[in-house]
Structure formats: C-alpha cells, structure tokens
Image (spheres, grey):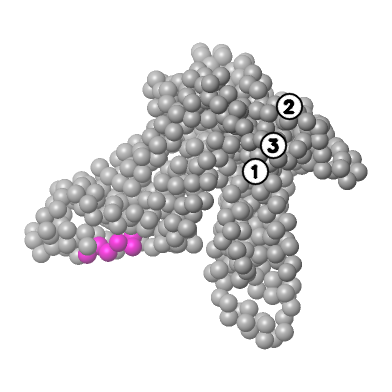
C-alpha cells in the first residue's frame, strides 16, 4: 500500500510538468497570462501550432532536426556496425588497441573538446552547415560497444561456413551479420535518434544562421531573446516531445533488445 | 562490463587454407577497412581535438584569430578570475548534491519498481520519460513552473496560504532548483541501471534472511546495500561525469543567473569560447582543468571501489 502511495506521488511529480505544458500549449495568450494559472484550456485551439508554423520558420527547424537526426543515425549505424564487426569477429594486429581507443573516447565528452573541435570543423569548411552537425558526433563509442557485444554471440562457424560457400567479406557482413544483429541495431537506432533529436550544444555551436537552427536551438535562442511569443515556444516544445511518445510505444522492443545485447 | 573475448577467427579454418596461420589477403585486409570509417571520425573529431585542446590553452587568440604562444598565462588568468572561481564553486556544490540525490533516489525508485506490483510497466515508463525529453525543454518546463508570479508551483503554494518565494531569483534557491531539475531529468536513467543491479542479486539471500526473521531494514543493510555496491559505483561515476557536463537544461532554466549563481563550468567555457570577446585560450584552459578534474575523480572512484571490493 505504501509502495503504491509513494509511486503515485512520485509519478505525479514526474508527469505534472509535462501534462501541464501540453495542456498549456492549447491555451490562448490571455489564458496563459492568467493568475492563478488554469489547468485546462477553455477550448483546445491549435492556434499556437499554426501560428508558430506560419509566423516563424517552425517548419524549417523541424525539418533541420529531422535531417540531422536521420542523417546522423544512418551514418552512426553504418560506421559503428562496421567497426563493431571488425572488433568482434576478426583477429588482427592492433585490434585490442583500437578497442581501448573506442572505450577511451567515452571519457572525452563534447563539452571538453568544444573549442578545438570547432576549429577542426571550421578548417574542413563544415561550420554553418547541417553536415557539420551530422558527421562529427556520428562515431559513438557506446554504439560500437553495444554492437560488438552482440556480435560476439554470433557463432564463428556461421561466418566460416559462408566463407566456404564462397561469400566475400563484405557480403558476409551485409547479408549474414547485419540481419542477425537487428535487435542490437534497433537499440542503437533508438538511442541515436533520441540523442540527436534532443542535442543542443553542438548544433548551437555550428548553426550561425537562423535557417540552420534545429528545434532545441530555436527554442532556446528564441526563449532567451524573447523575440517569439511565449505561446509559440510552448507549441514548439510540445512538438519536440513527439519522438518521446514514439519511443514509449516502441519501449518493449527496446527493452527486449537491451536484454539480448547483454548490457545488464 | 563483461567483455568476453571472442575466440580467434583463425581457430576454425576452411580446409582449403593453404598454410597454417596465413589467411587470404581479403580476410587480412577486411578488418582494417571495416574499422577505418569509425576510427577516422574518432581521430579527426575526438582524439585530435582532445590533444589540440591542450595546445590551444597555451596560446592567446585575438578574437579567434592570430594565435600567439603565451605559456601558462591562460592558466594564471583563469586562477585569478573571480568568475571562474564562482563557476567552479557552483559546479562543485551542484555535482555533490546531484550525485548524492540521484544515487539515493535511484536506489529507492529501483527498489519500488522491482517489487511485484500492479502496473509496474506503466510506472517504469513514467520514471523513464524525463530521460527522453530534450534538456532544453526540461529547463523551459521548470522555468515556467517555478516562475515567481505566473508559475504553477507558487499558485499552489499561494492557494494553501504558504509563502511564494522567487525560486529563480535568489542565488541559493536557484542553485537548489537547478539540482532538483537535474535529478528530475536524470534519475530515471540511473534507476534503470540500479534495477538491473537489483535483479542480479540472488533471491535466495532474501529468502534465507526472511526465514531468520530479518526485518526490511536489516535486509537492506546487510544484503541489498553491500551487493549493490558495484552498481552504485557505476551510478556514482556516471552521475558525476554527467553533473560536470551539465549545461543545456540550466541554459533554459535560469540562463546561469541570478548573477552567475547557476553558471557552471561548461557555461563558463562556452561563454568565453563563443561570446565576444572570444578568448579561446582561456576557455581551453578551463576545459583542460575540467577534464583533469573529471579524470582524476573517476580514477579515484575506481580505486576506492576496487579497494572496497577486495576487502
């Protein structure tokens, strides 16, 4: 009984801010300024959403976020899976060193290399471009680690049998290993989508012009400059939560995937 | 982490292999081609910048251009900058409180969520929800709720006749609010790790303790707590690293104010690196100090955990 009381009280603490802002996103500006604030909007209006879309480049920010998220995730999956396969299934000189390097990079967060990284990206001419947001964070040590752990469970005999049948190395990877890794690939996909969609600091540093803002950057910049009405920022914030809803739907799949990956 | 080494790929070889230990050229070349793209991105965008960051900290930059070597001048300037010490102090308070509350909350929540209760899946999903939200939005949500006049929290406090403080207006309250919001946003992730740790504890221990008539507190004190220590160590290290990196949700929650009370190290570095006057060298020196701090504390934590383990 005490367990339920504690869980329900804590759930309210977690959910209330989210529910409150979703409800508030349907309110008019006058309702939002009301004191004390109301819980439910008088009528559910989509004005804030359509207003943000028509008066500001809301659509552009959502599109930028989507391009960066999809582009970075596809790139992450491709290069992480390739590296994980080499580290899991080949015995080659330098393998252990490369694996250590991979794990070591977990210790170097973006915040610490912000300035030198920005310089490299500038020298490559990728600042103020979506490419500059997509490529630098694409190699994730966590992704390589997760996929490698999963690939270790694939029997070597399977790969050898394919070799005996005359399959090339690339063909074995694409046709045999990747399909077997679907649960682990799903986990990495979902993590990558959430990281990239919510990412703030790196896109903030890269996007100099407003037409390259991603959704979080637009929300934060407009909020601090107060050039966009509060109700539009609210609507944008709610839209940014949509992937979360999708995640909650996919949740079971993810949890099963994690369990099978051996990350326990 | 359990990194089981795979048996060498050469152990099972097709009978057609010509000589022992010699693989066809394509099998020898393939692994290097497979790791190349990932290592290229690591090298260009993580390892090279990390090494170069130290280098930059020894140079002065004239608004991002014309670098001149200055030795340790940036470090001396950093250590005499009042703003740096304020940011360092706020960071230490934030990290200590954040790690302590996150660890305690995640153990408590994990114990509740591993009990055989109704709607367990629902509750688990609820507590994981904030982890999935954009930190920018998390900061905004709470800045609306904690707003002095129009915020929901003070509306509730006022309705029951309690005082309505300016949560984000006074320094100590704002730093406290920052810790709270940080925990709100992250605790679900650490709870997930703790749940995995709890599930790994053999239930026969609890059954035996139950037969011996041990109460709930005794079971926690003598079974859960000691057996959960490796997991707790992981959570402490991860929370500490996350705490030192905190920036995005604070940026929208308080903007680092009032009067720099919630400006942590990363924001200090960001402001000196990207807001005029641009001082790359000084910001890079701050990054080096931050990295050394995180690195040293992580190593210390590991050593402490190891020592406890072997006792």
User: Share a chain, discs 2 and 3?
Assistant: yes
The residue to which callout 3 is attached is A41
The answer to the question of whether label 2 and label 3 lie on touching residues, with beta carbons closer than 8 A, is no
Q: Decide whether the magenta segment is chiefly helix, strand or loop.
A: loop
Residue B155 vs A53, above or below: the answer is below
Instruction: Locate residue B303 relative to residue B39 in the image: left or right.
Output: right
Numbered tag placed on residue A30 in the rendering:
2
**Marks 2 and 3, Cα distance to the nearest angstrom?**
11 Å
Numbered tag placed on residue B246 in the rendering:
none
Q: Position of residue B135 (x, y in %)?
A: 60, 38
In the image shown, does A61 or B293 lie closer to the viewer? A61
Q: Secondary structure at mark 2?
A: helix
Please report, as a chain letter, where disc 3 is located.
A
The answer to the question of whether label 1 and label 2 lie on touching residues, with beta carbons closer than 8 A, is no
Q: Is residue B229 visible?
A: no
Q: Position of residue B294 (x, y in %)?
A: 60, 43
């Amino acid at each position: 009984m005490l367990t339920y009381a504690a869980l329900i009280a804590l759930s309210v603490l977690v959910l209330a801010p989210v529910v409150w802002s979703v409800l508030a996103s349907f309110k008019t500006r006058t309702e939002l300024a009301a004191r004390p604030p109301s819980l439910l909007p008088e009528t559910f209006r989509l004005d804030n959403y359509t207003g943000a879309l028509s008066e500001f480049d809301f659509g552009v920010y959502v599109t930028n976020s989507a391009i960066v998220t999809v582009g970075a995730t596809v790139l992450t999956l491709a290069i992480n899976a390739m590296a994980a396969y080499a580290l899991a299934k080949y015995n080659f000189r330098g393998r252990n060193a490369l694996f250590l390097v991979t794990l070591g990079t977990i210790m170097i967060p973006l915040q610490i290399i912000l300035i030198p990284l920005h310089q490299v990206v500038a020298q490559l001419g990728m600042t103020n471009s979506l490419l500059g947001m997509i490529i630098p964070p694409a190699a994730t040590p966590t992704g390589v680690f997760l996929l490698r752990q999963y690939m270790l469970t694939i029997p070597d005999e399977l790969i050898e049998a394919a070799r005996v049948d005359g399959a090339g190395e690339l063909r074995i990877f694409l046709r045999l290993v990747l399909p077997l890794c679907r649960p682990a690939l799903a986990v990495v996909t979902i993590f990558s989508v959430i990281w990239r969609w919510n990412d703030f600091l790196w896109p903030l540093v890269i996007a100099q012009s407003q037409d390259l803002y991603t959704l979080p950057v637009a929300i934060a910049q407009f909020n601090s400059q107060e050039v966009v009405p509060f109700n539009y920022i609210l609507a944008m914030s709610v839209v940014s939560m949509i992937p979360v809803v999708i995640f909650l739907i996919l949740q079971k799949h993810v949890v099963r995937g994690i369990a099978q990956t051996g990350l326990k | 982490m359990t990194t089981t080494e795979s048996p060498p790929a050469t152990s099972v070889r097709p009978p057609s292999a010509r000589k022992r230990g010699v693989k066809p050229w394509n099998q020898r070349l393939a692994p290097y081609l497979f790791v190349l793209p990932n290592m290229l991105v690591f090298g260009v965008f993580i390892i090279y910048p990390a090494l170069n960051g130290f280098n930059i900290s020894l140079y002065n930059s004239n608004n991002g251009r014309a670098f001149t070597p200055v030795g340790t001048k940036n470090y001396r300037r950093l250590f005499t900058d009042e703003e740096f010490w304020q940011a360092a102090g706020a960071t230490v308070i934030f990290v200590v409180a954040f790690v302590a509350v996150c660890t305690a909350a995640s153990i408590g929540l994990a114990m509740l969520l591993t009990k055989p209760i109704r709607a367990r899946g629902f509750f688990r999903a609820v507590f994981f929800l904030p982890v999935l939200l954009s930190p920018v939005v998390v900061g905004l949500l709470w800045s609306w709720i904690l707003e002095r006049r129009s915020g929901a929290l003070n509306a509730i406090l006022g309705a029951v006749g309690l005082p309505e403080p300016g949560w984000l207006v006074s320094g100590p309250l704002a730093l406290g609010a920052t810790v709270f919001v940080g925990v709100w946003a992250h605790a679900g992730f650490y709870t997930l790790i703790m749940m995995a740790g709890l599930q790994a504890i053999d239930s026969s221990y609890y059954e035996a303790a139950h037969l011996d008539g041990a109460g709930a507190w005794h079971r926690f004190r003598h079974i859960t707590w000691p057996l959960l220590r490796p997991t707790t160590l992981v959570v402490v290290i991860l929370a500490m690293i996350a705490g030192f990196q905190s920036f995005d949700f604070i940026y929208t929650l308080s903007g680092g104010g009032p009067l720099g009370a919630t400006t942590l190290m990363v924001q200090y570095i960001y402001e000196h690196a990207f807001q005029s006057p641009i001082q790359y060298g000084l910001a890079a020196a701050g990054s080096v100090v931050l990295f050394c701090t995180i690195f040293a504390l992580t190593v210390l934590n590991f050593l402490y955990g190891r020592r406890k383990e072997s006792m």
